[in-house]
Image (cartoon, rainbow, N blue to C red):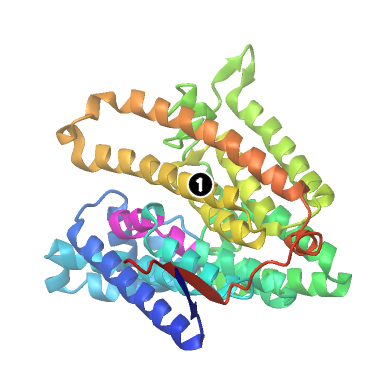
Amino acid sequence: MEVFRIKIGKKQVALFLIAFVAFGLLLRLCTAYNTVHYFDLDYYVDWSTGVHDGLFNAYDHVRRLDYPPLYLFPLYLAGFFVKMPAIQSFGPYLMLALKFFPIIFDTATIVLIYFVLRRHSRAAALLCAATWAVNPAILFNCANWGQTDSLMIFFLLLCFYTLEDKRPVWAGVLFGLACLTKFQCAYFAPVFLLELLSKNKLSKSLASLGAGAATGLLVFLPFMLQSGWDLPLRVYFGGFGKYAYATFNAANIYGASGLNGVLDNTPLVGSITIQAVSIVFALAILAGTVLAYAKGKTRCPWTVSFLLMQSIFMFMTRMHERYQIPALIFCLVASMRNRSGQLFVVYLLQSAMVFFNQFFLFTRVVQGQDTAWFVQYDTIFIVLSVLNVLLYVFSFYVSVKTLLSEPPAVRAENSEVLPSTESVPLEVSDNA
């Protein structure tokens, strides 16, 4: 038996990343081209053309516009192409114009994952980048459906990486930008604040928060001058109040209880409404997050953020099927930061679950009664929700165990020295 070692140097890393990006981008663009539909994309058609007609007063004249203003700039550029007769009249070209920026940000995330994880192991960082390049949940989200969650994921990943890298002011700016993509970024604020305040001087923390607030104000300001000073409140809370359901196709405990599409002001027990139960859960999740961060031996913000988002998705009302997607990136990074094979398994299983949650809803709406299981959707959704609840229990156990364990550096000191990850051993049989 001969053993060869392939050293992963900078040239090899560059070649791998170029391959992942090129193939990942090609796969996404071809998928976008071949998936012609208008489920939610009818909004983007109206928004892109409307924003192109008037950017800073868009909230006054564009119908149903409820996204924060950062995405309006890509919409403005998309509107230039959407208004072209050749593109407007040909569905595949229109799909490329509408899905282009989510695809670009998702492709950029492939590269960013490597840089976030490379200090631990080039080989592991490349592996994680590769798994994201072919991750069915996020690929379906940006390329098939054309949703914009990839923008939020990119800025969140860069924000927490910058915060971890002891650049709190830039982290504040990036968190501000993340919140300007989608309101759901605010769910990660507790972990961001815990990490910021516990690892930086008060002056640095205040500077970071000030930078984040200034970033939000700077981007909102030209729109507020046209549409009123209360615009941020109308954008964030107006959109949140549109879907006041126990769950809106999110496979969580409410979905498992058959409450999909039921208003959250519906009494659950006596006069106690579903929303009241959700508020209790929210307070418990917040307290649990602080406790997990304070008592955990690792104090890993990636693990705590994953657990936080998992719990919010599972127990709070008004969740959509896509709201679990950001948890995936935090689970992936946490698995490498903690050298946890179990967390990586959770990432793989959760990716499959998020994919199916999107897939069954999307095909039901787009294909309608042509879908073979159209009439069984409610049953399928309940089963999927039950499975997701069980997966949550497993992910909760693994996350808590990881947080309560010694950090990887301490474990390495108390055990045999870990082998170098800069070279990958390959065993080749003499008889091969």
Secondary structure of the residue carrying numbered label 1: helix
Left or right placement of residue 38 versus residue 417 in this view = left
The residue at the point 44 percent across, 83 percent down is 12
Q: Which residues are magenta?
A: 138-152
Left or right placement of residue 212 versus residue 231 in this view = right
Residue 143 among those drawn in magenta: yes
Residue 383 x/y as whole percent: 41, 26
Is residue 211 visible to the viewer in this orientation of the structure? yes
Screen quadrant of the N terminus: bottom left
Say if 396 sits above or below 177 in the image: above
Say which quarter of the image contains residue 359: top left
The residue under label 1 is: 324
Q: Quick one: which residue is furthest to the right in this view?
A: 202
Is residue 252 visible to the viewer in this orientation of the structure? no
Left or right placement of residue 154 versus residue 33 in this view = right
Residue 351 x/y as whole percent: 45, 49
Disc 1 residue type? Gln
Say which quarter of the image contains residue 44: bottom left
The residue at the point 25 percent across, 41 percent down is 363
Say if 81 sits above or below 232 in the image: below
Q: Nearer the viewer, residue 183 or 18?
A: 18
